[in-house]
Image: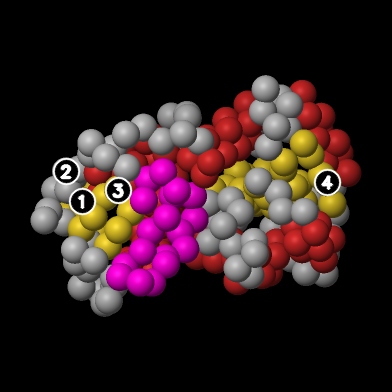
């Protein structure tokens, strides 16, 4: 049974109690807080394995909490799932740009929420299948360590979110193979991808390029195949 710790941040008591009950039933250790300030304090006091973060919070809102978590070397690698109002596309994009890994819109189904949490925890901490015949993928000065889930260029360590790493792993394991946005979503999630989710892949790809490439506008590694999707450059 799962033993990962999850920090749940929401100012609605009913949602906190509902989510806490269902997460605890799955075997997770759960900490609940109602404000952004308490979320930051709790995350720094005892690092959770995942943060479930409502964006609409009093005082320090969820976007600011996400920004501060991702700016702090101590907490920047903690996976974040955002809870956002239905139709809040601008907030979704803003959260992804700040480093959040995934999102669930309110009102949400518990089955979907649990599926997204499990999928994100697995890709952040779970065992990796042997990709490309080895545990290290090397492309020029780019090194991808599958076992330790680390990426570096030369001597520079590159911090990726769990979702960014998983997308990179799939692309880099099969250089030249073109993946559509839908395929990438289905590879990193446990449930059928929704059409309206496909645009979030663009945000993650943009982040990967900003972190990996010397010039994101002229990428060497993660390439766009017009009308088809994305591919990793062949050696």
Left or right of 47, for residue 80: left
Q: Write down the residue under mark 3.
A: 136
In whole angstroms, how far apart are the C-alphas of marks 4 and 3?
38 Å
Q: Write down the residue under mark 4.
A: 32
Which residues, given as a range, are shown in magenta? 145-162
From the image, which quarter does the N terminus lie in? top right
In whole angstroms, how far apart are the C-alphas of marks 2 and 1?
6 Å
Name the colour scheme: secondary structure
- Sequence-first disc among 2 and 4: 4
Dot 3: few (<14), some (14–19), or many (≥20) neighbours within 10 Å?
Answer: some
From the image, which quarter does the C terminus lie in? bottom left
Left or right of 131, for residue 50: right
**Residue at 70% of width from left, 32% of height from top?**
3
Give whichever of 145, 95 is nearer the camera: 145
Task: Locate residue 218: give its quadrant.
Answer: bottom left
- Sequence-first disc among 2 and 3: 3
User: SS at mark 1?
Assistant: strand
Q: Write down the residue under mark 2.
A: 177
């Amino acid at each position: 049974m799962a033993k990962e710790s999850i920090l749940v941040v929401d100012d609605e008591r009913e949602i906190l109690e509902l989510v806490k009950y269902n997460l605890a039933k799955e075997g997770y250790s759960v900490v609940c807080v109602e404000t952004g300030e308490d979320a930051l304090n709790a995350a720094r006091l005892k690092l959770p394995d995942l943060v479930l973060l409502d964006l609409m919070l009093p005082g320090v809102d969820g976007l600011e909490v996400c920004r501060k978590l991702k700016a702090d070397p101590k907490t920047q690698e903690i996976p974040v799932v955002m809870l956002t109002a239905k139709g809040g596309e601008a907030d979704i994009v803003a959260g992804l740009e700040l480093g959040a890994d995934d999102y669930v819109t309110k009102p949400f189904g518990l089955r979907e929420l649990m599926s997204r949490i499990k999928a994100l925890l697995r890709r952040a901490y779970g065992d990796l299948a042997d990709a490309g015949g080895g545990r290290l993928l090397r492309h020029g000065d780019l090194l991808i360590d599958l076992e330790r889930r680390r990426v570096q260029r030369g001597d520079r360590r590159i911090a990726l979110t769990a979702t960014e790493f998983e997308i990179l792993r799939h692309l880099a394991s099969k250089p030249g193979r073109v993946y559509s946005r839908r395929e990438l979503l289905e590879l990193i999630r446990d449930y059928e991808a929704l059409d309206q989710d496909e645009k979030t892949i663009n945000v993650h790809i943009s982040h990967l390029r900003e972190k990996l490439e010397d010039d994101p506008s002229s990428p060497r590694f993660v390439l766009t195949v017009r009308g088809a999707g994305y591919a990793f450059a062949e050696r």
